[in-house]
Amino acid sequence: MTDHSPSRSARGVYGISVTSELSGVGPQTLRLYERRGLLAPSRTDGGTRRYSDDDLERLRRITELVDQGVNLAGIAHILELETRNSQLKSDYTQLELRNAKLKADQKPAPAHRQDSGASRRRREP
């Protein structure tokens, strides 16, 4: 297995009929969601759709939003915002870790003597 292979959850393994059965969403609706950009299943060399566990999870979220009365355009927007939010959280966590490492790697600065110049000045009576 190479470093470029998708994770197990992202690997397309389910055909459209199995995905339909697992999700309770009809094949025509799955095709509609793909046309609207809500789902992007992988394809075999022959063009057969292959849905992954990640696709099934996304489909669960889509179904939840449909059940709440959100239209497909709204769902697309919500999913995009959720994806961007997750990426921002991940980026923030990485920056926090880098910042903590930089702070840990900093050597303590040598203590500076507070020299007001009084030792060099002559005291006046």
Image (cartoon, helix red, strand yellow):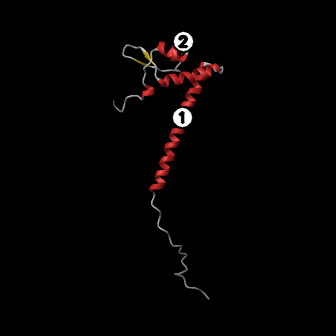
Density class for disc 2 (Cα within 10 Å; few <14, some 14-19, many ≥20) is some
Question: Which residue, as the protein is rendered here, is positioned at the far right?
Answer: 69
Determine the secondary structure under disc 2. loop
Q: Quadrant of residue 10?
A: top left
Question: Which residue, as the protein is rendered here, is positioned at the far left?
Answer: 1
Q: Nearer the viewer, residue 121 or 72?
A: 72
Residues at marks 2 and 1, CA–CA distance in whole angstroms: 29 Å
The numbered dot on residue 67 is none
Residue 105 coordinates in the image, percent (x, y) = 44, 55
Question: Which residue, as the protein is rendered here, is positioned at the far front?
Answer: 22
Q: Amino acid at mark 2?
A: Gly
Residue 41's place in the image compared with 114, above or below, is: above
Q: Amino acid at mark 1?
A: Ser
Residue 52 coordinates in the image, percent (x, y) = 46, 22
Residue at 46% in and 53% down: 102
Density class for disc 1 (Cα within 10 Å; few <14, some 14-19, many ≥20) is few
Determine the secondary structure under disc 1. helix
Residue at 52% in and 43% down: 93
Say whether residue 24 is left or right of residue 105. Answer: right
Residue at 58% in and 25% down: 77
Question: Which residue, as the protein is rendered here, is positioned at the far bottom?
Answer: 125
Label 2 belongs to which residue? 26
Residue 16 coordinates in the image, percent (x, y) = 47, 14
Residue 103 coordinates in the image, percent (x, y) = 48, 54
Q: Quadrant of the N terminus?
A: top left
Label 1 belongs to which residue? 86
Q: Quadrant of the C terminus?
A: bottom right
